[in-house]
Image (tube, helix red, strand yellow):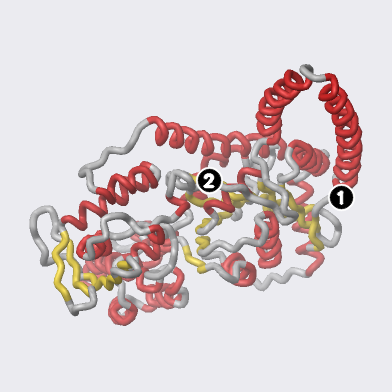
């Protein structure tokens, strides 16, 4: 049966969904919620997309801390939409990354009532607008075609990767025989069936190697072609479809991409799973938004705990070398542990000079002394520039030097980690510095707390000023006159600010979707 849908059918369907989602005055309650947030903190961001009937179609929001977090840690982003195919739940999307402790940080969230190219395009533009147009260096998503096209259209400076966890799940689904179908087939199996079953684990292993292990593009092409020729036409069709996107998932095409070591959207999915029961379509949207706040705060509390632990105790140092002592003070404990592991590996490295210009072949011996299974890496050092560039590419991908490069630094008698190998995003000072909005104003995470700290500071200052002024009548007159002028200026400033805020609250951020 061939079913066709007219534009009117589609519009009625979407309109019906939105009316179900935002029934009983929820749209008005939601607008008030967002405007209250802006009144609390002008750095709060939200945007609404309206359709031709002026119904809300998509919603994006990010609080001040999300904006600050993205400024510090928005180099790699994962985005995942949860429950988009399940009518029981609202389609929800979240932008997520990693902070200096490798803990999850949230950069923004969205409720999407349709998942088309136009909707994703609007959402990604709203995301960039909230973050002063700063593009990520890499973004991971699932294989949704509309989403992928929108990523390419909007995130023009970012490398786009596909979630390898999802791809591997699909590989199991498409490259293994469906066991459920076996119940309807004859119990006896011929030799061809048995050979195919024996081949399945090998096919998955071969595909996994193509995805995670093969580093050379030529070797990848050869291995993929061999694997392709082992399977039947149906499996070959899936392999051909995923091959078209090889640059987005194969290790050999990601060697020089800064990804922080991430390969999937599981950061986003983990956060989404915490919210699942609050995304049911019959839940009040304000209840959801408030629960979302609590879920985000839960993630932020983990960061506070990590920060407290980092200040309370120093990490364990395996050997007191200048570089490890330096790194223990600079890096957060989590990153220092990773760096120290690479440093210890460098101690087990064997080197072979390839020329007189600090070019070495480096291989790291395993704990059992076996060297045969270890890959040799080519490391090019420069003692004047204090650089050590390794063919494994770990620093390019993660921002943490590998054991091979550290070995060559040591051979060049460089005993401290050069500054250009210390990424601020991994250090204890990752959050230092003021973040400004597109108008040049400093973004404050918690204005009430900030005001309280200023009050405390100024109270002390004004108390000292009053004490000093009372000594001299002339000083008292000076202070009285200055305070009178200052009070008038403050009243004028506050009146102007109140007027601007009142005018801004009459405007609803929107997009002519």
Going from N to C along the chain, the mark reached first, 2 or 1, is: 2
- Residue at x-position 80% and y-position 53%: 509
Q: Is residue 342 left or right of residue 458?
A: left
Circle 2 or circle 1, nearest the eye: 2
Q: Percent from the top left, x then y, of residue 459?
A: 71, 23
Disc 1: which residue: 507
Q: Is residue 237 left or right of residue 486?
A: left
Does the CB distance between marks 2 and 1 fall below 8 Å? no
Depth check: give the residue in front, 396 or 8. Answer: 396
Callout 1: SS: loop
Q: Quadrant of the C terminus?
A: bottom right
Q: Percent from the top left, x then y, of residue 393?
A: 34, 67
Question: Does residue 33 lie above or below 140 as drawn?
Answer: above
Disc 2: which residue: 431
Q: Percent from the top left, x then y, of residue 298?
A: 53, 35
- Residue at x-position 40% and y-position 44%: 332
Callout 2: SS: loop
Q: In which quarter of the image is the N terminus?
A: bottom right
């Amino acid at each position: 049966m061939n079913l066709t849908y007219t534009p009117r059918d589609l519009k009625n369907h979407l309109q019906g969904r939105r009316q179900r989602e935002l029934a009983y005055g929820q749209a008005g309650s939601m607008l008030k919620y967002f405007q209250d947030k802006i009144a609390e903190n002008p750095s709060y961001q939200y945007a609404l997309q309206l359709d031709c009937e002026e119904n809300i179609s998509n919603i994006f929001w990010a609080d001040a801390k999300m904006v600050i977090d993205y400024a510090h840690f928005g180099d790699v982003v994962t985005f995942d939409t949860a429950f988009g195919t399940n009518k029981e739940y609202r389609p929800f999307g979240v932008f997520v990354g990693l902070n200096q402790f490798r803990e999850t940080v949230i950069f923004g969230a969205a409720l999407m009532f349709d998942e088309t190219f136009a909707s994703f395009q609007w959402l990604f533009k709203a995301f960039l607008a909230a973050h002063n147009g700063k593009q990520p260096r890499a973004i991971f998503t699932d294989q949704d075609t509309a989403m992928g096209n929108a990523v390419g259209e909007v995130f023009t400076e970012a490398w786009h990767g596909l979630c390898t966890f999802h791809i591997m799940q699909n590989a199991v689904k498409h490259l293994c025989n469906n066991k459920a179908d076996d119940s309807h087939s004859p119990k006896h199996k011929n030799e061809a069936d048995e050979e195919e079953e024996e081949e399945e684990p090998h096919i998955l292993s071969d595909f996994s190697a193509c995805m995670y292990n093969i580093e050379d593009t030529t070797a990848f092409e050869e291995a993929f072609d061999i694997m392709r020729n082992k399977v039947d036409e149906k499996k070959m069709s899936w392999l051909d479809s995923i091959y078209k996107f090889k640059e987005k998932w194969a290790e050999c095409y990601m060697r020089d991409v800064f990804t922080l070591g991430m390969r999937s959207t599981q950061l986003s999915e983990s956060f989404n799973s915490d919210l699942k029961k609050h995304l049911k379509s019959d839940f009040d949207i304000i209840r959801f938004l408030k629960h979302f706040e609590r879920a985000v705060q839960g993630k932020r509390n983990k960061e506070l705990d990590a920060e407290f632990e980092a200040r309370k105790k120093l990490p364990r140092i395996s050997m007191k070398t200048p570089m490890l002592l330096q790194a223990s003070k600079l890096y957060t404990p989590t990153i220092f542990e990773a760096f120290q592991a690479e440093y210890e590996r460098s101690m087990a490295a064997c080197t072979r000079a390839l020329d007189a210009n600090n070019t070495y072949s480096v291989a790291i011996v395993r704990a059992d002394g076996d060297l045969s299974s270890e890959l040799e890496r080519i490391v090019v050092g420069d003692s004047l520039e204090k650089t050590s560039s390794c063919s494994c590419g770990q620093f390019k991908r993660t921002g943490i030097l590998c054991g091979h490069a550290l070995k060559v630094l040591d051979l060049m008698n460089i005993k401290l980690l050069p500054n250009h190998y210390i990424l601020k995003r991994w250090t204890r000072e990752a959050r230092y510095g003021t973040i400004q909005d597109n108008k040049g104003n400093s973004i404050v995470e918690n204005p009430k707390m900030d005001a309280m700290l200023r009050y405390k500071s100024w109270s002390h200052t004004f108390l000292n000023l009053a004490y000093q002024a009372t000594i001299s009548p002339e000083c008292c007159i000076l202070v009285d006159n200055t305070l009178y002028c200052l009070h008038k200026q403050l009243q004028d400033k506050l009146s102007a600010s109140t007027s601007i805020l009142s005018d801004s609250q009459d405007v609803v951020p929107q997009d002519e979707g």
